[in-house]
Amino acid sequence: MAVTLQALLAEANRLMEPEAFQDYCPNGLQVEGRGEVRRLVSGVTASQALIDAAIEQRADAILVHHGFFWRGEDPCLRGMKRRRIAALLENDISLIAYHLPLDAHPALGNNAQLAKRLGIVVDGGMDAGPRSVGNVGHFSEALAPEQLAQRLVDVLGREPLVECVGEQPIKRIAWCTGAAQSYIDKAAALGVDAYLSGEVSEPTIHSAREQGVHYFAAGHHATERYGVQALGEALSRALGVEHRFIDIDNPA
């Protein structure tokens, strides 16, 4: 079933509420393609590999979490950026991106979808208000650190980096997908047993050790595969467009 690009954007914006966020990039339509959408391809990042795969799949639009035009980057369309955007324009494919709105959504977001897969009961946000990017929750039964590590392997298909700070079990946990390693201090202040993010930095390990919080870094890409899939499926159900998720492997 074909829908107009504007109808697709209207439904996506209704779900994501991008106007409620101060983000590092534009949310919504970033590159305009043809006016009708029959096939929507989703992926984590608008890389050349994803664009090439979408062209091969004869997609009309691409939906991603990591799009283009980040704050502070060189705005000139040269080299890699030129090739990516040229491929979209030459094939009349729209690029639609949602960054923080897709992290924070209480049902479709990266954090909500990861919690669902890991068996975490969401208690609330790491920040006050309805649009917190990170979350706090609990497991129905406490897990040993090695049990959570194995669950991450089983769910995400990759070995996490784990910093254990003792043998205490994990009942309460805070988490935020992607590059949210700096939130560990906020998590520690909330009194959780463990904190989970996608990426890790050198200071993160010291913070975990000194504040007595188990820490898990499960990969930026690996932790953010699920929100964009959930949004794509929601758009497919609501509008009847065909949706296909394409996972471009990234070990980071």
Image: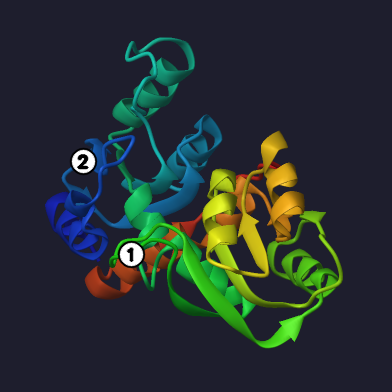
Q: Nearer the viewer, residue 235 or 114?
A: 114
**Residue 123 horizontal/vertical position (percent):** 46, 79
Quadrant showing the N terminus: bottom left
> Helix, strand, or loop for circle 2?
loop
Q: Which mark is residue 77?
A: none
Q: Residue furthest bottom?
A: 140
Residue at x-position 28% and y-position 57%: 38
143 vs 240, left or right, is right
**Mark 2 crowd level (few <14, some 14–19, many ≥20, 10 Å Cα):** some
**Residue 107 horizontal/vertical position (percent):** 38, 73
Instruction: Residue 59: tell me if it is visible.
Output: no
229 vs 236, left or right, is right
147 vs 95, left or right, is right
Which residue is the site of mark 1?
128
**Residue 19 horizontal/vertical position (percent):** 17, 50
Residue at x-position 66% and y-position 45%: 249
> Helix, strand, or loop for circle 1?
loop
Nearer the observer: mark 1 or 2; the answer is: 1
Which residue is the site of mark 2?
34
Q: Is residue 199 above or below residue 111?
A: above
Looking at numbered disc 2 in the image, what kind of residue is underneath it?
Arg
**Residue 252 horizontal/vertical position (percent):** 67, 40
> How far is the residue under mark 1 from the one under mark 2?
40 Å
**Mark 1 crowd level (few <14, some 14–19, many ≥20, 10 Å Cα):** few
Q: Nearer the viewer, residue 14 or 194?
A: 194
Looking at numbered disc 1 in the image, what kind of residue is underneath it?
Ala
The first of marks 1 and 2 along the sequence is 2
Q: Is residue 139 above or below residue 78?
A: below
Q: Is residue 111 above or below residue 35?
A: below
